[in-house]
Image (spheres, rainbow, N blue to C red):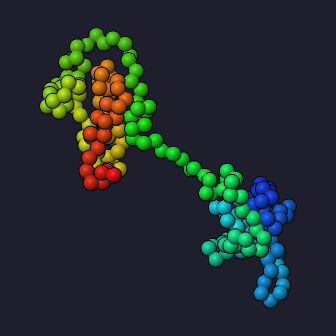
């Protein structure tokens, strides 16, 4: 474990913990025998831990965790943006958002090919009998190993049909994409 090179925590987080140059964070911890010892501590995953020095460096485990409000150690205030309860790690877009904003329906200009030449060999059987061009994407059943192929196939399918009213309309495009997602693993 590598220790911090400088004090980068707020006073509310430190509490009674203090920074010692060339050493790191330390705290005065009272023991049951009435003595108080200076121990090395570290703020890890938003909790304070007592460190044990070994020949390989410092280490700690769950038994070294200092309970909140013990020995005066601090933590992030409830309303502070760095409080773990207030953090949003990432917000993944929903599939509908991905379909509506991740696939640009740009028009590269007029095509000199006829529709039959644009997708050779396309028949009504290839696209489910609709008036859309190209082979419909395979149904996505929730198997994550097939997700990239599904996304790629649906992008191609939508791009081939970018000038069709059902694809230009975000609502219709989203519903069409959802119609290719079926099975017990994706019902919810």
Q: Is residue 3 left or right of residue 19?
A: left
Residue 59 seen from this side: yes
Q: Residue 134 in the image: x percent, y percent?
A: 23, 28
State the image quarter where residue 5 is shown.
bottom right
Is 18 displayed left or right of 182 in the figure?
right
Q: In the image as oriented, which residue stretches furthest toward the right?
A: 21
**Where is 111 relative to 18, above or below?**
above
Query: As drawn, is 35 to the left or to the right of 84?
Result: right
Q: Is residue 168 above or below residue 179?
A: above
Task: Give the quadrant of the N terminus.
Answer: bottom right
Residue 149, percent across and down?
A: 32, 41
Counting every numbered tag in the picture gives: 0
The residue at 18%/26% (across/down) is 122
Q: Residue at x 29, y 26 (%)?
A: 166
In the rendered image, which quarter is residue 84 located in? bottom right
Q: Position of residue 154 (x, y in %)?
A: 32, 34
Q: Residue at x 57, y 50 (%)?
A: 88
Q: Can you tell which quarter of the image residue 175 is in?
A: top left
Note whether 174 is above or below 15 in the view shown: above
Q: Position of residue 79 (x, y in %)?
A: 69, 54
Q: Can you see residue 51?
A: no
Seen in the picture, residue 83 relative to 116 is either above or below; the reply is: below
* Residue for point 73% across, 71% down: 69
Give the residue at the far front of this rendering.
79
């Amino acid at each position: 474990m590598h220790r911090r090179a400088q004090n980068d925590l707020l006073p509310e987080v430190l509490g009674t913990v203090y920074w010692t140059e060339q050493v790191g964070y330390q705290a005065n911890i009272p023991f049951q025998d009435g003595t108080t010892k200076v121990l090395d501590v570290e703020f890890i995953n938003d909790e304070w831990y007592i460190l044990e020095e070994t020949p390989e460096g410092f280490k700690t485990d769950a038994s070294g965790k200092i309970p909140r409000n013990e020995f005066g150690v601090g933590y992030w205030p409830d309303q502070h943006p760095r409080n773990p309860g207030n953090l949003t790690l990432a917000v993944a877009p929903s599939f509908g958002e991905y379909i509506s904003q991740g696939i640009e329906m740009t028009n590269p200009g007029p095509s000199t090919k006829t529709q039959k030449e644009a997708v050779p060999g396309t028949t009504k059987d290839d696209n489910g009998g609709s008036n859309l061009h190209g082979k419909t994407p395979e149904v996505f059943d929730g198997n994550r190993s097939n997700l990239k192929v599904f996304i790629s196939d649906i992008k191609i399918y939508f791009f081939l049909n970018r000038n069709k009213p059902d694809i230009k309309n975000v609502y219709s495009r989203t519903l069409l994409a959802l119609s290719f997602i079926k099975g017990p693993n994706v019902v919810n």
